[in-house]
Image (cartoon, rainbow, N blue to C red):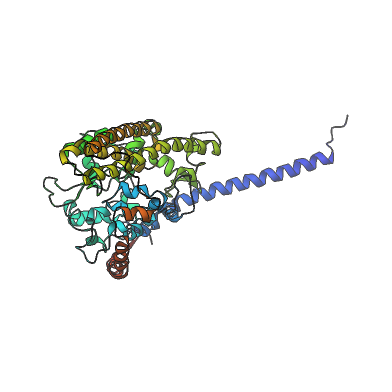
Amino acid sequence: MSTQRKPIVNWIIFFTTIVVVFFLGLLASSITERRSEEPVALKPQVKIAQFDPRNDVWGKNYPTQHESWAKTEESDFKSKYNGNAMIDMLEVDPRLVVMWAGYGFSKDYNQGRGHIYAIEDIRNTLRTGGPTDDNDGPMPSTCWTCKSPDVPRIMNEEGVSEYYTGKWARLGAEIVNPIGCADCHNNETMELQISRPALVEAFERQGKDVANATHNEMRSLVCAQCHVEYYFDKNRPGSEGSAYLTFPWDNGTKVEEMESYYDAKNFKDWTHKLSKAPMLKAQHPGYEVFSMGIHGERGVSCADCHMPYMTEGGRKYTDHHIQSPLDNIENSCMVCHKEKTETLVKNVYDRQDKIIENRDELEKLCVRLHVEAKTAWDLGATEDQMKDILMDIRHAQWRWDYAAASHGGSFHAPVEISRVIATGINIAQEGRIKLARLLMTLGYSGEVPYPDISTKAKAQEFIGMPIEKLIKEKEEFKKNLMPKWDKEAQERESKMTTTYVNK
């Protein structure tokens, strides 16, 4: 038998060897390239000063993270209920106008956009009015607190209580950089840090030290600086006269625990224009609700899903394109869940559908409560007769708002949010029974007519809002005062130095 190999076999071995060597070469090149990228990518280009609010300066040292942060400008994603584009929520649901009659949100309320729009959107909303100078306008300076890394800079320069004092327009030329790097990072170490005092103070009142938080806990707590329930305390000892931003967490973070905190202080955000009820406005208790859900209980952080880890050039980094995980399921949900994309999306929408169905019922009841209470007042009801009813209105709508304003709450903690809405419906029904009895006592029979609030315009007309006047004032503000702010800010920031290193 011949031991000589056939020519074809030799050719196969030859070409196989060439292919193997080629791919080994590519692998070696890739490894070499990636090893060389890492020190270049982490090589500081500038020295970042403490409280430097300029995101582009931070971006010189961390270009990958900065580029991903800049993607918060995108507004092309729409989920079943929200997304990242601006949506006029009062147009979508005119009942909200009646729910918030007498409060700023009845003027204007939009689905929020990405962090990069924080300054632009707060300037444009009708809620901040049309101030003509530093001492004019409906809102306090505190309303800037979660909008910019300029805020910790101003707090450091003025003092915390002083920052919370005065009108919103007072700081228009000072606060110009949108939410960014200095809001969450230490300028020297890039470690996550808390830059706003309200969270630290809330921890202290509960006997806890936020400095003891783990890195994983910090990946949620930096978000909890803003995505929480808060109020403006105008009676804080030592800070009287300021609108001191405070978290109502002393009794806990459940809806009843924060409600009892507010009730004990006899606090109200506003008096409802129709029902005269002492109302509470839930801001956005996202962290509180998330903590009660299965992901929060299992130690998943906000960043795990909304800012998942990515890789580029062999390096792992956090994606600063903060967004709904539904727009990035492969890098968020699928890190842990192995189901198909359509299954995961369905799981989210199923929970949202079921909860929003009941939340809408509570919303309708709240609208009826306000309208029926107004009828009772018009018929001569006394404050003593209305006292318990007004508290029912306050507590029912507080539960609705806690569920509605806790961004993503119906997914983050569906069991708890379902419970909250159910108790809200019970309270609202009790209030309507009391109102029905009172209306009969006052000589009213039959059902109080439900107003035509089928559009935002009709709803704002129903509550007597001078919307044309508000729009005109805003346009005048944008024409006259805003350019002055921008010019002053540009001149101030032109004097800020940028120190380059390793040149």
- Taking 438 as reference, is 28 left or right? right
Question: Residue 454: x percent and y percent?
Answer: 40, 50
* Residue drawn at point x = 21 percent, y = 41 percent: 201
Question: Residue 279: x percent and y percent?
Answer: 24, 43
Residue lying furthest top: 1
Question: Residue 236: x percent and y percent?
Answer: 14, 45
Quadrant holding the C terminus: bottom left
Residue 256 appears in which quarter of the rendering?
top left
Whether residue 208 can be seen here: no
Q: Is residue 13 above or below residue 132?
A: above
Residue 324 appears in which quarter of the rendering?
top left
Quadrant holding the N terminus: top right
Question: Residue 286: x percent and y percent?
Answer: 34, 41
Residue lying furthest left: 238
Please name whichever residue, 255 or 223, is drawn nearer the observer in this view of the structure: 255
Count numbered badges in the picture.
0
- Taking 81 as reference, is 297 left or right? left
Whether residue 384 can be seen here: yes
